[in-house]
Amino acid sequence: MKILLINLHSSRNAGDHVLLEVALQQLRTTFPGCAITLAMNDPASYARRANAGDEQVVDSFFAWFKRPATSKRGGWRRLTLLWSLAMSLVAALLYRLLWLRADWIAPAAQRPIVRSYLEADLVASCAGNYLYSRGHAAGLPLLGPLFALFYAWLAGKPLVLLPQTIGPLWRRWERLLVRWMLMRAQVVLLRDATSVELMARMKVPPARYHLTPDIAFLYTIDDPAPGDGLLAKYGVDPARARPLLGVTLIDWSAQHPRFKGQARYEAAVAAAIRHFVETRGGTALLFAQVCGPNRADDDRVPARRVRALLDAPHLAGRIIVVDEEVRAATLKAAYGRMDLFLGSRLHSNIFALTEHVPVLAIAYQDKTFGVLRMLGLGEWAIRIEAVDDAQLITKIQQLWEERTQLRRQIKANVASLQAEASQALHRVEIGGRRAHP
């Protein structure tokens, strides 16, 4: 059996990489002996970070377009993309209507991905959050992940959407297109109640989707030593430097120009860190959950800016930027050594929560609220647009005071979500083959 996994971005995003690792484990358990192909925007990142595996990795339809242009002829670049997609669509139509595998019709750069679709017995869209509105380019970037889904349907392939957040969808045409596509998928798995509520507003029949936790809750580490090694590299001994506050940031304005509050958000995080370290002692560590592939995606950029806001003699050595790209397992182990976690990246929060660390989440999208609500922790999420100094300081104080009780609650609720997440693919049936976890 051949499976194509689509809408994969980059393994330089630790959360995305973990979602991919867990998805591969679940697919191999569900369909023993299957051959899996990965269609990625940044395929080189997977080859560099992945454990040894036999997955084939190909460029996604948009990998070439997402790479930096080598010339200023952007118009020709866009025309080339449109021509490539058009010829790829012809290949899918010929396959659907005549059972003719004519991947040779597509331009050379697209032939591997077209061939992968046409040969697949199942197309699975990766877990995550890519079906949502963008504030720039009139929302057109949404068409990229939708095209990847549409191509599977056009080629007549069974389509499964692994657990993900859908929305927000601001524009009517976006809701119509997304609804049309979801109605043509065999299985749609949603990872939070916020997405379920959106489905109800869009009048998607409940039988078309199923609520299941984020599969990142299933990611476990066998050895915490790499996390201790990372902390030691930066001069931090968990036995002596406590309390430890872990922090992740996001350059949200660089990714979404509609957001105008980046400076205020960073200043509020800096104020909360300063207050925590001054009143509790200990050390704050600013981690990079994502390091690329583009500068806008690199968490080290806002982390350095926040560190600059805390450049005071009495804080020397107590505010540390982990200024390097770190593997997901190492990050998770290091997060597990924290006493509290102030996280902007969703999966950095999930990494910390699965290590039973109390989290205050800064939500840049609704997915954060949805996931924390499933854990009974909805009060510990703050919308990025609403963040200010006083609010963050107050919530961090409350988190510290309730940390012992919260650890017990998190441990119990995470175990429950992990049990549910392990059943994520049990509804998938292709060619009479069904998962029975």
Image (spheres, helix red, strand yellow):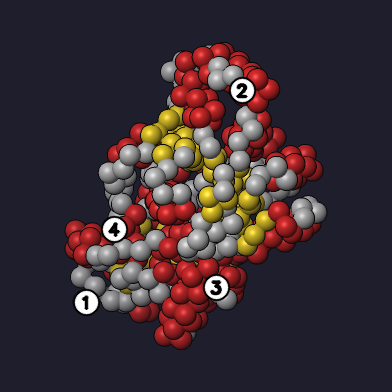
Picture quadrant where residue 90 is located: top right
Spatial CA distance of label 1 from label 2 is 65 Å
Disc 2, SS: loop
Disc 4, SS: helix
Point out the tag, 1 or 2, that comes first from the N-terminus.
2
Q: Label 2 belongs to which residue?
A: 99
User: Where does the image place residue 343, in percent across and percent down from the top left?
Assistant: 46, 63
Spatial CA distance of label 2 from label 3 is 47 Å
Give the residue at the far front of this rendering. 432
Q: Amino acid at mark 1?
A: Ala
Where residue 375 is drawn, which disc sits there?
3
Establish if 213 lies above or below 289.
below
Instruction: Judge the density around disc 2: few (<14), some (14-19), many (≥20) Cα neighbours within 10 Å.
Output: few
Establish if 433 lies above or below 243.
above
Q: Are marks 1 and 2 in contact (CB under 8 Å)?
A: no
Where residue 239 is drawn, which disc sits there?
1
- Of residues 67 and 130, the one nearer the viewer is 130
> Which mark is in front, 4 or 2?
2
Left-right relation of 199 to 4: right
Q: Residue drawn 51% across and 56% down? A: 435
Q: Label 4 belongs to which residue?
A: 330
Instruction: Judge the density around disc 4: few (<14), some (14-19), many (≥20) Cα neighbours within 10 Å.
Output: many
Point out the tag, 4 or 2, that comes first from the N-terminus.
2
Q: How many marks?
A: 4
User: Where does the image place residue 8, in percent across and percent down from the top left?
Assistant: 48, 41
